[in-house]
Image: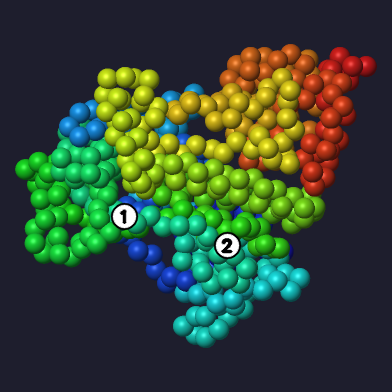
Amino acid sequence: MRVAVLGGGPVGQTAALLLARWGVPVVLVDEHEVRDPVGSKAICQQRDTLDVWASLGAGCLAEEGLTWTTARTFHRESELFSLKLPDGGSALPPFVNISQARVEEVLDGLIAQQPLIDVRRGHRVTGVTQPGCVEIQCETKDGPRRIEADYAIACAGSRGDTVRRALGQQLAGFSFRDLFLICDIRADLPGWAAERRFHFDPPWNPGRQVLIHPCPGSQFRIDWQVPDDYDLAAEETGGALDRRIRAIIGDRPYEVVWRSVYRFHTRLVDRMRVGRVLLAGDCAHLVAPFGARGLNSGVADAENAAWKLAWVLRGDADEELLESYHAERHAAAVENAAVTTATMDFLVPQDDGQRARRLDVLTRAATDPAVHEQVDSGRLAEPFWYADSPLTTPDPARPSGGRPPRGALPRPGPGVLLPDVTVASGRLRDLARQGFLILTTPGVRAEGWRSAEIPVGGALGARPGEAWLVRPDAYVAAVLRIGDQRAHLVPGVRGVTRVVDDVRDRADAAE
């Protein structure tokens, strides 16, 4: 039994490595013979994405990436405010900037060492059918090929139209009219290396925005919002691109490493599970990059898909578990689309009313800190909380409070990712990623389960007599108490519905 992963970008690579870690054979299919190592592309990697990669042996990405902890926001020539990112009690930084090309290089190295992953490069997918399994038709330089798998994860990216059509899906939504020019430059800019800078209506790009991100090796990525008729070739030929860059960095040496022009989109498929195929990453959803919710969300798709497929393939769960992939990750994609669309409406107002509101907010934010929360330059990527998932048992003592304020972390509880902390048995998330885990408070015993004792209080805010059921992706599924009668905690997963009976007072268990 094996899983086909369609697409060899970071989301597909992550999915393949996670499946192999669970002991699932994988065939990784990619249309490209070799990689393009140029360009920053998806650069902003969030802590929990770094955590997933570190669990696979790619901890160097957090170490190599440039850590930034401050987000500065400007309007015209004045700084409005700066935001310090929370450390979250983790050894990992909240964000690092590192190029997608370097991520791919590191993950390729891990894949090369993994005997359970069969890489098929130069295979362009031309069709996908499901006659009781998944059949993938491919075109190669040596002619057509056919690949069979029990299940598949489609990570074919935004251009994976052939895969989506074969599954009866399309990326429905809309595209933003304005273009964005992206330049990677190498320059010495003292004091800029630890902060992201966002400029509303600067004098050197009037009426539009500019975003500046530091990257490793004295590189900086600059994004300019430009008109929809922008001509990059003409700017380069006439010297306007040089003037555009020098308006930001001044009269100092620099080198253009890469440049491109993009149009941003908000698009989403209707179904992220179609039979035996799960859609992930840009193959399933596209959002504007402000807030870095693209690749980071795709990695979360990969982890969610991998453990559920592994449980089904080894007979530890019914196939109905896969439907929860759609329920959880489609909800995450909907939220990301809503967040980024609100950002783009603030960045690129669609009518006179939106333009007037933005000017009013930016003007008042210069003197009123209470208005800072309304300045939308992109809510930074964060894990999606599965409070409404069919796999989550709500806890009346810990009701979901929805999204916390920007820059804050939610209170731990059902549907929330475990905080990245350590206990006597080791790092909590590492323990969780070995399978279902019961975290017990002193005096509580979980018979027949992998368990670890946690103190009352602490980072989880656990209370006496509690046991916390944690999923293999380190999300809390339920908080149990001695004598609790709730059941069907994780539908479709064999053995988990009886966890209630296994949580008991340690003294009673000893009798």
- Give the side of residue 438 with respect to residue 63, left or right: right
Q: Residue at x 52, y 86 (%)?
A: 143
Residue topped by disc 2: 154
Which percent across, then down, holds residue 129?
A: 67, 74
Among the 4 quarters of the image, the one containing residue 36: bottom left
Q: Give the Cα distance between marks 1 and 2.
A: 30 Å
Could you say whether the residue bearing mark 1 is in a helix, strand or loop? strand
Name the residue at the left extreme: 251
Q: Residues within 10 Å of mark 1 (few under 14, many from 20)?
A: some
**Amino acid carrying mark 1 in the image:** Asp
Q: Is residue 221 above or below residue 411?
A: below
Q: Amino acid at mark 2?
A: Ala
* Residue at horizontal 22 percent and vertical 60 percent from the top: 230
- Quadrant of image for the C terminus: top right
Q: Is residue 437 visible?
A: no
| Residue at image point 48% right, 26% down | 405
Identify the residue under disc 1.
178
Query: Where 241 falls versus 402 (above or below)?
Result: below
Which percent across, then down, holds residue 352? 33, 43
Residue 204 on image: x %, y %: 15, 43
The quadrant of the rendering that contains the N terminus is bottom right
510 is higher (above) or lower (below) than 238: above
Residue in front for this viewpoint, 207 or 94: 207
> Residue drawn at (64%, 27%), measured in percent from left and top?
400
| Element on which disc 2 rests | strand
- Mark 2 packing: few (<14 Cα in 10 Å), some, or many (20+)? many
On the image, the x and y values in percent for residue 9 come to 46, 59
Farthest right residue in view:
511
Q: How is the image coloured?
A: rainbow
